[in-house]
Image: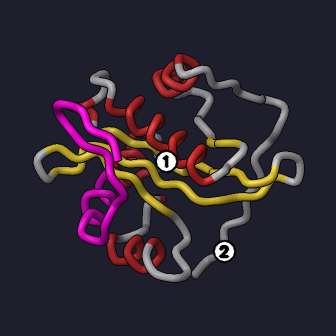
Amino acid sequence: MSNSMEWSIRKAVKEDMGQVASLIKALAEYEKEGDEAELTSEDLIKDGFGDRAAFECLVAEEKGDVQGMAIFYPRYSTWKGRTLYLEDLVVKESERGKGLGKALFMALIEVCRKEGYRRLEWQVLDWNEPAIKFYEALGSQFDSSWLNGRITFPE
């Protein structure tokens, strides 16, 4: 999909899910919620591939190693229509500040344009200043007037 001198961005395959699961765990630990990340690579394979896939994933790869990923899925806005929701964008700590996160984000914008989405949405924790600055530098706006609701169902 996209290339740089160091890495390429492409659609994830099942074989990437072990590395994707590791990035998700690292994100959960960074967000001080390490115990909440329960999904395994097997769960990601089951949920992310096939006719009823619940998400899509882009990976940024360098020499066979996944250095970053973006997990996203479609939503629908009754005001704007087709919307893409970015669940997580994660770059390995050792690769941050090199443009990889921006490249992943721009690849996701390319997906939106190509597939006719009218909006890209995501959330960021209010204390995560590096992420907030990253998104603001890309022209993003934040709306603090909405509260997030959630119900978690036990298995």
Disc 1 is placed on an element classified as strand
Q: Position of residue 71 (x, y in %)?
A: 47, 54
Is residue 67 left or right of 87 when viewed as pictured? left
Is residue 6 left or right of 87 when viewed as pictured? left
- The residue type indicated by label 2 comes to Phe
**Residue placed furthest toward the left:** 63
Label 2 and label 1: CA atoms lie apart by 21 Å
Query: Is residue 18 shown in magenta?
Result: yes
Rendered view: 126 above or below 1: above
The boundaries of the magenta stretch are 1-23
Q: Residue at x 47, y 41 (%)?
A: 31
Q: Residue at x 53, y 55 (%)?
A: 72
Q: Residues within 10 Å of mark 2 (few under 14, many from 20)?
A: few
Q: Position of residue 5 (x, y in %)?
A: 17, 30
Q: Nearer the viewer, residue 79 or 121?
A: 79
Q: Which residue is mark 1?
A: 88
Rendered view: 142 above or below 18: above
Q: Quadrant of residue 60?
A: top left
State how many labels appear: 2
Disc 2 is placed on an element classified as loop
Q: Which residue is mark 2?
A: 153
Q: Residue at x 30, y 28 (%)?
A: 96
Is residue 139 left or right of 119 when viewed as pictured? left
Q: Position of residue 127 (x, y in %)?
A: 56, 27
Q: Position of residue 99 (x, y in %)?
A: 33, 25
